[in-house]
Image: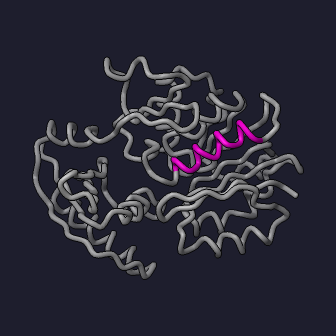
Amino acid sequence: MKIFALTIKTELGNEDILEAIIDSEESEMSVLGYNTEYKPSDENMAYTNIYSETENDAKNNLNFINKHLAEYEIIIEKEYEIKEMEEDDYLYSYVNFLKPFNVGSLTVVPNLKNEDNIDMPKPVIYIGKQYAFGTGTHETTFLALTLIDYYKNNVTHDENIDIADIGSGSGILSLASYLLLSKNITAVDNDEVAVSCTIDNIEYNDIEIDKKNIFAGSADTLHEMKKDYDFVIANIETDVLIEIMPHLFNILRDKNSYLLLSGILEAKKYSMIKCIQNFSIDIVKQINKGEWNAFLCKVK
């Protein structure tokens, strides 16, 4: 089987923007998977490889990226090429740069279990390579994991707190919350494929999250169900976070409840802060990585 790779070369740092476009809920791209390559011989550049089934898909993906950048008035210098490759080469290329990493006490392996990673330090999360999003390697997910670890170590909480993961994707943040905080996890995503990814990764990690609490839905869905939570996590792009803030606020339980927001572009940070100020919550911790920000907020 032939695979087509769209490779976009940009200055270091701009790969974060490209990865956010690929992961966006608004994405119209046809993607089998993607990874970002960093070459020692070209240390100031990043190579984002986006894999598709057809050459036409690869061209459409490039057009969508250019359109998305133009809509948000983001200008980045880039070079690109589309090349045909064998499926075996694709599989090797896809996983070649997905390496285990640590966030606090947590080890994340953005890959399947194998003889090289089966004995990683615990607690450990494995994310199957067949999932194109939510491996933890993207800055927004890394920031969210960092704030979950911060919450664990700095916020007094009961081990049975109720947690909601909004836009669960691969389920990585649900898995991290289960291992670090509480077994009472609800995970929702408006994409059925993402819901399946969450369930598959939970089963792959032998985690016993109640399957009835993993379903297609949103913060609004949970509010309609009259659910509330001690800790709500939303790793979603900024515009969507602003849109759904009333629903996120509505499912926070009380003055001891926290809200984790990630996926906030630096260019939109103050729009997000202005939105937060409309609600009875305070930002208690703010972190950033590259062009991205994440906030930990507490109900006043």
In which quadrant of the rendered image does the C terminus lie? bottom right
Residue 15: quarter of image: bottom left
Residue 25: give x, y in percent of width and height.
48, 59
> Compared to 241, does 178 lie above or below?
above
Looking at the image, residue 197 sits to the left or right of residue 160; the answer is left
Instruction: Pick the residue in front: 72 or 27.
Output: 72
Q: Is residue 211 magenta?
A: no
Residue 70 appears anywhere in the view: yes
In which quadrant of the rendered image does the N terminus lie? top left
Instruction: Pick the residue in front: 254 or 39.
Output: 39
Residue 140: give x, y in percent of width and height.
52, 54
Residue 193 appears anywhere in the view: no
Looking at the image, residue 212 sits to the left or right of residue 143; the answer is right
Residue 240: quarter of image: bottom right
Q: What is the total number of numbered labels drawn onto the structure image?
A: 0
Instruction: Pick the residue in front: 212 or 47.
Output: 47
Looking at the image, residue 33 sits to the left or right of residue 145; the answer is left
Residue 181: give x, y in percent of width and height.
70, 32
The kind of secondary structure the magenta stretch mainly shows is helix
Residue 258: give x, y in percent of width and height.
77, 49
Q: Which range is magenta?
A: 141-154
Who's the residue at 47% across and 61% down the image?
A: 290
Who's the residue at 38% across and 80% down the image?
A: 70
Judging from the image, the colouring scheme is: one colour
> Compared to 97, does 212 lie above or below?
above
> Compared to 255, does 156 lie above or below?
above
Q: Is residue 152 magenta?
A: yes
Who's the residue at 51% across and 26% down the image?
A: 124
